[in-house]
Image (spheres, rainbow, N blue to C red):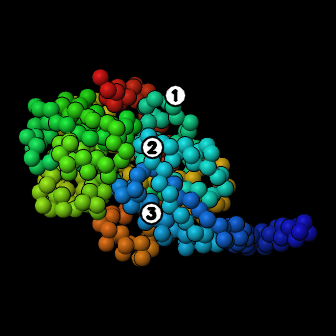
Amino acid sequence: MKAEAMLRSVVVVAALLCGDGYQLAASEAGEDIARFYKGKQITMAIGSSAGGGYDLYGRLVARHIGRHIPGSPSVVPSNMPGAASLVAAQYIATVGPKDGTAIAAIYPQVVLEQLIGDKSSIKLDPRKLNYLGSANSEVYICMVRASSPAKTLEDAIRMEVVLGATAPGASSYDFPLLLNNVLGTRFRIVAGYPGNQEIALALEKGEIEGACGTGWSTLASARPHWVRDGFVRLIAQEGLRGSPELNALNVPLAIDFARNPVQRQIMEIVYAQLLFGRPFVVAPEVPIERVAALQTAFMAALKDPELLAEAKRMNLDINPMPGPDVKATVERLFATPPEVLAATSKALRAP
């Protein structure tokens, strides 16, 4: 076995001297990756409860990415909800396999929580994670039941509106809190729901009046009839840029309600995470050649006609961002001046 390895090294060196080394080395690396993954099973840890948008995207990618990874491993999705996907992210970063057989579909809020949130309970640095990419750039929405007295975002500044949420750190909690502290809305946030699915059921039952921080793609795929039949009213888009469909419906951008540059800058920091709205990650220790193979497979899967056809049937938007671009965006967020981060952290702190 040692002789074979030595022979392979000699061949690679000889090829390098001949100018063909890059292709040969790349070919051998691909063969090594295929040998590693052949017959293996990859776990896709989805950091949300079943039925929500992150679950739909996670399972969609899990169904298609395997055939684009050298060796064609099987990919098995598993829900790992908790603390706005921090449970899944920390599993990947701490106790999960470090060999490239564990992937997590997490909320982008994990990045923001480490940047400006309570760092004492977090055992990971988002800058060290390896990002396979993001399945889409997301636009979140604020919505209320049609029966709510509040019909617009301006109404929510004048009157109390009861919203459902999961927990601090999740968009369902942090996004309406941001609007309360920056724009002066009077959202009363009722936390404790396990996930977006449970928040939706509470809204249907009339336990709450609405929700903020819900992905437009989630609502469009899971409950398109809510908008079509007029069950809910969309009162704001939450993000740096609007969705074409929501722009056509004249749903305003929350950030346009900022009254001064400081308010706008705070909202820009929070909404920047939506540029990589559906990130997929592996552990920092995964060998670089496997990370590269998984990144390539991720982008190939999201351009696969079969995945795109299925996404269209599910009303899921696909707008992928490559892993290196996601990581660069995370690095830029961490380079934000401390005084701006302090103001943003204050804006996401409950009174």
* Image point (45%, 43%), residue name: 82
Residue 338, can we see it? Answer: yes
Residue contact between numbered discs 2 and 1, judged by CB atoms under 8 Å: no
- Give the percent coordinates (x, y) of residue 14: 83, 71
Q: Are marks 3 and 1 in contact (CB under 8 Å)?
A: no
Q: Describe the element under mark 1 as helix, strand or loop.
A: helix
Residue at (40% x, 52% y) in the render: 49
Mark 1 closeness class: few <14, some 14–19, many ≥20 residues within 10 Å: few
Q: Quadrant of residue 15?
A: bottom right
Task: Give the CA separation, mark 3 to mark 1.
Answer: 31 Å
Residue most extreme to the right:
3
Residue 272 visible in the picture: no
Q: Earlier in the sequence, mark 3 or mark 1?
A: 3
**Residue at the spot of label 2:** 82
The span from disc 2 to disc 1 (Cα, nearest Å) is 17 Å
Q: Is residue 183 above or below residue 95?
A: above
Q: Secondary structure at mark 3?
A: helix
The residue drawn where x is 65% and y is 67% is 40
Label at residue 120: 1
> Label 2 amino acid?
Gly
Q: Is residue 271 left or right of residue 248?
A: right
Query: Can you identify the residue that label 3 sits on?
Result: 59
Residue 163 image offset from top left, x and y in percent: 23, 39
Residue 249 image point, x, y percent: 14, 57
Mark 2: secondary structure: loop
Residue 302 picture quarter? bottom left
